[in-house]
Amino acid sequence: MKIHEYQAKEILKKYNIPIQEGYAIENSADIDSTIKKVQADFNCEAVIVKAQIHAGGRGKGGGVKYCPTFEDAQGAANTILGMNLITHQTGPEGKMVNKILITEALDIEKEYYFAITFDRSKNSDVFIVSSEGGVDIEEVAENNPDQIIKAWIDDSPNALESAVKEIITSLSLEEFENVEQMFKDLYKCYLESDCSLLEINPLVSTTSNEIIALDAKVDIDSNSLFRHPEIAAYHDKSEEDPLELKAAEYGLNYIKLDGNVGCMVNGAGLAMATMDIVKHCGGEPANFLDVGGAANVETIKNGFKIILSDKNVKSILINIFGGIVRCDRVANGVIQAVKELDLDVVVVVRLQGTNAKLAKKILDESDIELISAETINEAATKAVEMIK
Amino acid sequence: MSILLNKNTNILVQGITGSEGSFHAEQMMEYGSKVVCGVTPGKGGHTATIKKLPVFNSIDEAKKEFQIDATVIFVPPRFAAKAIIEAIEARVELIVCISEGIPARDMVTVKNMLDKSSSTLIGPNCPGLITAEESKIGITPGFICKKGSVGILSRSGTLTYEAIDQVVNVGLGITTAVGIGGDPVIGSSMIDILKHFQNDDDTKGIVMIGEIGGNMENDAARWVKENLSKPVVSFIAGQTAPKGKRMGHAGAIISEGSETAEAKIKILKECGISVANTVSEIGVTMKTLIG
């Protein structure tokens, strides 16, 4: 689960990590009073106004503004709150800014990149740091790979100690007080909050010789939310695709794509493979949709509803491998759902597994317009050809 | 011959009193699996039985009365890591975890324990494994399997079934099919399973199904090139998956260039592995190699 910068900073603060302080708001009526409060509480004239959306590249997109005066801040806050922010991570349609964070401005000496994540191949957490902070780290990785330092934390007794020493040396931060403890606290925060990523870009040193987290990006392992109710409450539904949210309510796993061939499949791997074969046959998949192991009338009906909410969809390819669930039951479910929903798109059905032959007979003999297919290849070809 | 599992494997079911556990215990027995007992903490006792199987409070209790070669775990995700650890501590040789949604942090702890033990873990978030016409542990539909010469390993459940079905339909049949799971942290890697197939004389060819995310397929490809003497057919799902979006499985998300389907397919081919262009071509591709 993704959370906002201001929420990530709230978590960091609990672990005594020095952060760039500020307040988040969502109503424009609160802009003036909040700017004044930031100026008073943190003893500064200049402030920064930062759009709070779940995407990077906010600065380049115009979502982060340095404001030397109250009036500048007023103007920037009114512009950014409610704007449609387009960054390289939002896609061309952009994202509505529903919240802004107004923070103190700091006198920055140097910017660093800092992250902790999990390295699957080593079954270890890893610190990733660079003295080229504040920029797109992927560009640094591409152009200056030597500038990126990794230090792994395996389960040996002194792993954390030595990894922390390694990153301090590589960033030449030895002169700063408490920096060792700060990195240890960051790791503690990462572990205890079940983060899949904790990224600070930039981590800065200031002219008054402090190390401060200017930004914070934290992703939480969704599987762990049951033990973090306070983090689960950070979930911002306005950041998610409404169709994907609706699908989640139905217990379906749906991701919208840009094509016009809707896909309804059981199992994530088979769902991806089905999208791939649609593309291979010259079509474009409209979505990823995994209806899960138990494909019954209800899940199929809900799947249709979700797919058809996307107006680009011209045909629907249903690909179910019936294991424990028998195909004849799935076939009857498809027929019932099509009748009840009064569909006006091409529906191609391929059922394989237990009672597949019986299922095909049921589909072929039904009085509704369905196209049945035996192999995935045949099904995908039909779903693509029928709408050309 | 087969790998990891045969008709004589004595199987225990953890979470046997739950609806999934009891349903699949019965399905497994119908297939011929030698399920000997179950465990549910707090529900065991002298008279407790389900599907005529005795139920114990712990694996240690069960081991006093039965020889246990393997355990299969059907418990809710928040308790699943604890169940795996219990099995490791009870020195069960083969542990299969079906449960989906276990926190990654819990699995890191499990994996570290596992590395210091003699147990093998398959999963989590997987369909388990099946040795054709002998035994199955987990939820793979048994009726699609016929005995033959192809070993199957896969990160995805329904793609495992699809591969079995195609390999059987082209007339080859399977030895053992193993679903290793779709999570970022899993007990057995592709290489771990390939090593078993390498040593199994009945396995003449191997189907290896991967997907986007992680680098396991890339590591496996390089291992195959260096070590494996049997033909491998591979398929990678997710060629049309967008970057940064989690495609159902917790492990199926692209975060680096080497984790895309395109990059994996390139590496597999460079290592001499036949890659099926589409999911439909897995069976026929294997047929051309060992048919």
Image: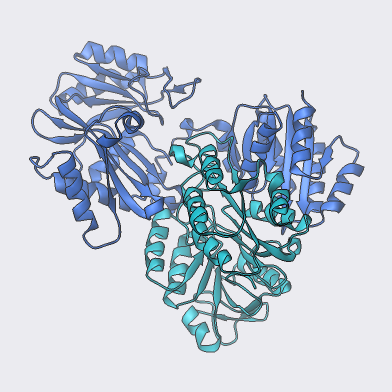
Chain colours: A blue, B cyan
Identify which residue is drawn at 65% across, 51% down: B159
Q: Is residue B291 left or right of residue A129?
A: right
Q: Position of residue A325 (x, y in %)?
A: 73, 56
Q: Position of residue B115 (x, y in %)?
A: 39, 66
Q: Nearer the viewer, residue A332 or B242?
A: B242
Identify which residue is drawn at 49% across, 69% down: B120
B17 is higher (above) or lower (below) than A370 = below
Kindly tell me whether residue B196 is visible in this rendering: yes
Q: Position of residue A261 (x, y in %)?
A: 70, 31
Identify which residue is drawn at 51% across, 43% down: B267
In this figure, what is the number of numbered marks?
0
Q: Position of residue A139 (x, y in %)?
A: 34, 28
Q: Nearer the viewer, residue A381 or A202?
A: A381
Kindly tell me whether residue B248 is visible in this rendering: no
Q: Is residue A173 left or right of residue B237?
A: left
Q: Nearer the viewer, residue A230 or A316?
A: A316
Q: Quadrant of residue A363?
A: top right
> Which quadrant holds the N terminus of chain A?
top left
> Which quadrant holds the C terminus of chain A?
top right
